[in-house]
Amino acid sequence: MTERPPLPPFNFETATLKVQMAEDAWNSKDPARVSLAYTEDTEWRNRSQFVNGREEVVAFLTEKWKKERGYKLKKELWSFTGNRIAVRFEYEYHDETGQWFRAYGNENWEFNEQGLMQKRFASINDLPIEESERRL
């Protein structure tokens, strides 16, 4: 199995780097690229949706970024221990009608020994905003 440094156990520097790498990958809006950070059998809860495995991750993200246009994400390290990292995030996007939203949320991540994310649990809330209120 391919390693995806930094590897657990995490310290402040490696956890911060892992969060930045995730932010950069998600902002690429490239589902195949993003999926490589996860185990083949990764388990996700994203809002009320459950996603299992890399193939479902690619399908999920492909659909997500078709609907969430102009997507821009910012993640921040919240906490870490051993092979787990918690982040807070916000992202902005607009829908097909041009309505802008800011989404706020928290994610809990669990990594295997190779540094691939095996579990991702996300809680997310969307807030409609005016384009003039955008921060990202």
Image (cartoon, rainbow, N blue to C red):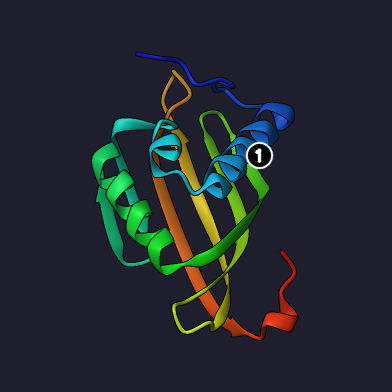
Closer to us: 125 or 57: 57
Observer-nearest residue: 12 or 1?
Answer: 1
> Depth check: 4 or 92 in front?
92
| Position of residue 51 measured from the top left corner of the image (x, y, whole percent) | 27, 51
Q: In the image, what residue occupies the spot 40% across and 44% down?
A: 31
- Please state which amino acid type lies under the numbered disc 1: Gln
**Dot 1: within a 10 Å radius of its alpha carbon, few (fewer than 14), some, or many (20 or more) residues?**
some
In terms of depth relative to the viewer, which is nearer, 16 or 8? 16
Mark 1, secondary structure of its residue: helix
Q: Image quadrant for the C terminus?
A: bottom right
Residue 18, by quadrant, is top right
Asked if residue 81 shows in the view, the reply is yes
Report which residue position mark 1 lands on. 20
Residue under the image location 45 percent in, 37 percent down: 110
Give coordinates of residue 5: x percent, y percent. Answer: 56, 20
Q: Is residue 37 left or right of residue 22?
A: left
Quadrant location of residue 49?
Answer: bottom left
Against 95, residue 107 (above or below) is above
- Quadrant of the rendered image containing residue 81: top right
